[in-house]
């Protein structure tokens, strides 16, 4: 068992694209630097949305539709089990914008990069559920404005959500676990350093060592769908 995981301890789990990869959700960026065939700066920045909203909406509409064809995998299910059975403090922070953690049953969860199934009205500031195509002619259900709705996704150059409770949890946790993330995108890439500074034991599970691998006490390599259920069983069963 990983040291520092007694049942009274607080756990913070950070998940990235590698957790959803076994469900068929594309990872954030491939080896060619493209995200599902697009340059990141063309679909994931506020400037891209101002420059070509049709392209950005088409990109996220396609990703939203893709979610209807995929299911949570064993990693999501294992983390939902941990959420249900861990008697101490637990927070799952995901960088993913899919809803697979929720569909698996996780409840102690924060989306730091937004959610694909939410819309955000730039006119009135309201956020709301959105499961269909959005497009440039979308109407805000709160204020009735047309053409001011965007995906509630944190793009490059924007501040991630829920940073205050995440920072508090990083300072309190006794075990920090990073799963399926490259360690290349800040501020999430710096979470391990914060957690370790405050005394947490740090474990990463990934296909390959992350860019911040040297900051972890332990690295386990492999697919999240295989590693995470074994770790959760070890934690709860041990």
Image: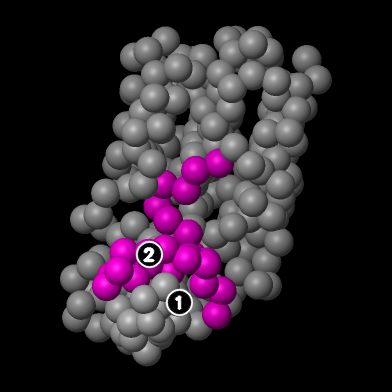
In the picture, the quarter occupied by the N terminus is top right
Q: Residues within 10 Å of mark 1 (few under 14, many from 20)?
A: some
Q: Position of residue 58 (x, y in %)?
A: 41, 83
Q: Residues within 10 Å of mark 2 (few under 14, many from 20)?
A: some
Q: Residue at left 47%, top 66%?
A: 128
Say left or right for 29 vs 21: left
Q: Which residues are magenta?
A: 109-132
Q: Nearer the viewer, residue 219 or 185?
A: 185
Mark 2 = which residue?
Answer: 126
On whether residue 11 falls in the magenta region, the answer is: no
Asked if marks 2 and 1 touch (Cβ < 8 Å), the reply is yes
Q: Position of residue 8 (x, y in %)?
A: 64, 11
Q: Residue at left 45%, top 17%?
A: 172
Element assignment for label 2 = loop
Height in image: 18 above or below 192? below
Q: Quadrant of residue 147?
A: bottom left
Q: Position of residue 195 (x, y in %)?
A: 40, 20
Height in image: 204 above or below 112? above
Mark 1 = which residue?
Answer: 141
């Amino acid at each position: 068992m990983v040291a520092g995981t007694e049942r009274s301890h607080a756990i913070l789990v950070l998940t990235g694209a590698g957790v959803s990869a076994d469900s068929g959700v594309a990872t954030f960026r491939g080896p060619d630097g493209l995200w599902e065939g697009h340059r990141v700066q063309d679909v994931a920045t506020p400037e891209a949305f101002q420059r070509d909203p049709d392209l950005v909406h088409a990109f996220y509409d396609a990703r939203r539709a893709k979610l209807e064809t995929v299911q949570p995998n064993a990693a999501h299910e294992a983390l939902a089990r941990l959420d249900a059975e861990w008697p101490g403090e637990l927070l799952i922070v995901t960088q993913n914008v899919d809803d697979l953690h929720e569909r698996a049953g996780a409840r102690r969860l924060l989306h730091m990069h937004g959610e694909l199934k939410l819309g955000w009205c730039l006119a009135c500031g309201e956020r709301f559920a959105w499961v269909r195509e959005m497009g440039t002619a979308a109407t805000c259900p709160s204020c009735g404005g047309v053409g001011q709705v965007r995906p509630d996704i944190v793009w490059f150059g924007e501040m991630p959500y829920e940073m205050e409770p995440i920072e508090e949890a990083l300072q309190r946790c006794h075990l920090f676990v990073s799963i399926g993330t490259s360690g290349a995108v800040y501020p999430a890439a710096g979470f391990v350093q914060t957690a370790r500074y405050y005394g947490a034991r740090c474990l990463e599970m990934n296909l390959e060592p992350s860019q911040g691998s040297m900051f972890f006490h332990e690295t386990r390599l492999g697919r999240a769908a295989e590693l995470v259920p074994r770790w959760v069983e070890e934690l709860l069963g041990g």
